[in-house]
Image: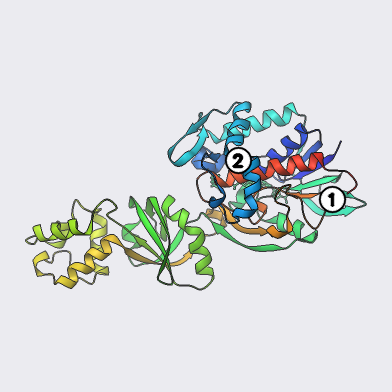
Amino acid sequence: MNQVIVIGGGAAGMMAAITAARNGAQVAILEKNNRIGKKILATGNGRCNYTNRFASVEDYNHPDFVGIGLALFGADESINFFQELGIEPKEEEEGKCYPMSEQASSIVDVFLYELDRLSIPVHTEVQVLTIQKKSNRFLVKTNKGEFTSDQLILATGGKALPASGSDGSGYAYAMSLGHSIRNVYPSINKLKLNSPHLKHLSGVKIKSSAILYVNEEPIQIEEDDILFTAVGISGPTILQLSREATLAYEAGKHVEIGIKLLPTMLIKEVVSRLKNFEDKTIEQALIGLVNKRFIGPLVKDAGLPSIHTLVSSLSKREKEDLINLLFDWRFEVSGYLGFEEAQATIGGVSIPEINPLTMESNLVPGLYFAGEVMDVDGRCGGYNLQWAWTSGYLAGLSSAIAEKNV
Ligand SMILES: Cc1cc2nc3c(=O)[nH]c(=O)nc-3n(C[C@H](O)[C@H](O)[C@H](O)COP(=O)(O)OP(=O)(O)OC[C@H]3O[C@@H](n4cnc5c(N)ncnc54)[C@H](O)[C@@H]3O)c2cc1C
């Protein structure tokens, strides 16, 4: 029987522990919080979007690395796993799956039942001080004594929402065992904008598309809700763009978000509307077309005299400028909010140092990784938890069936 220690009782750690125990290992979880699964409670706005039925390699930053795992334990396997534990899936738009109960706590509850059924000890409020490998055994020194094992799974998460426990401390353990860490940044996060209109626009929400421009090149387009905030912009559309925006901003590139205010209209329809409304002011011509709070900022950014200017007095060029803004209103990205506001982590334990089939370290036999601690991140929509289940399953299985005395 292999003895397996799992450090980190989050999504990936719990999946790893259960899988290892089901495959005959003697498992223990070491968790620094006073309870496990804390971050899961915050996921999916408290409903936990626990997988995406269409999850594929393209939804991740390292498609080649995640491919084997997703083929072995992908969305279908996750849905089955949770269904067997009692979670009925409720599929919503674009394949997003939630528990039928609409409570993220249901996911934590069924994990707790299963950990209990398998008699897996969970040691909470454990501060790991050092991890060493001695004579083919791992020695974990903590504030609550020493733990030893044949295999060790590091599932300490990334740095997103540090209040949930994942504060990046796992990176130091990985480094102490010889691994390298790819630079970490927040992902699925809100962006800061350089715009004088934010105070006025804060709270305005639209459903539309946005394009991410990097050095004037369009590189990504997304469509969903967009929300203006006091410091910038948020909403699912922006969260999906935030990864590439953050990396481009960090690389010192010129980053802009282009917002299409009229997702269902053609330019020629707006041209003809302005023609029909020549006798109206700009404000009157735009009322009923866009949120009223956009009108003043649009007029300013188009360089037009005033919202009270008659449409008939606009030059052809001025009308074109206004119409261009309605279809591609550019906002310069001036930064991004930090890990406190982020849902995922870019970077982590370097992927070439990990076996994609087993999640075992290529450097330290018997050491495994699971979840966000690795340099793997996915899109918003159930993909990151799916990676926690996939990698947790692989690490748990491989550690349980691994040959001893490696
Ligand atoms: C607000 C929010 C909403 C999200 N919503 C979704 C969603 O709906 N769908 C989705 O797919 N993804 C979502 N995510 C992302 C998803 O929650 C994570 O990708 C996932 O939880 C990662 O799992 P993990 O087990 O690797 O890390 P975590 O869940 O972060 O767990 C790591 C665990 O390790 C513990 N730990 C850390 N350091 C130590 C240490 N030194 N010693 C002992 N224990 C330690 C932590 O306390 C924690 O319990 C969301 C994230 C956030 C922040």
Residue 2: x %, y % from top left: 85, 39
Per the image, the residue denoted by label 2 is 74
Mark 2 and mark 1 lie on one chain; the one further toward the N terminus is 2
Camera-side residue of 328 and 184: 328
Amino acid type, label 1: Lys
Determine whether, in the image, residue 151 is placed left or right of residue 349. right
- Look at discs 2 and 1 and give the one toward the viewer: 2
Per the image, the residue denoted by label 1 is 141
Residue 43 quadrant: top right
Which residue shows up at 15% across the image and 71% down it? 316
Residue 89: x %, y % from top left: 52, 31
Residue 234: x %, y % from top left: 42, 54
Which residue shows up at 81% across the image and 41% down it? 4
Camera-side residue of 116 and 22: 22
User: From the viewer's perspective, is residue 24 above or below residue 278?
Assistant: above
- Mark 1 is surrounded, within 10 Å at the Cα level, by few (under 14), some (14 to 19) or many (20 or more) other residues, namely some
Secondary structure state at the residue bearing disc 1: strand
Q: Exactly how many numbered labels are in the figure? A: 2
Camera-side residue of 262 and 227: 262
Secondary structure state at the residue bearing disc 2: loop
User: From the viewer's perspective, is residue 327 above or below residue 203?
Assistant: below
Amino acid type, label 2: Gly
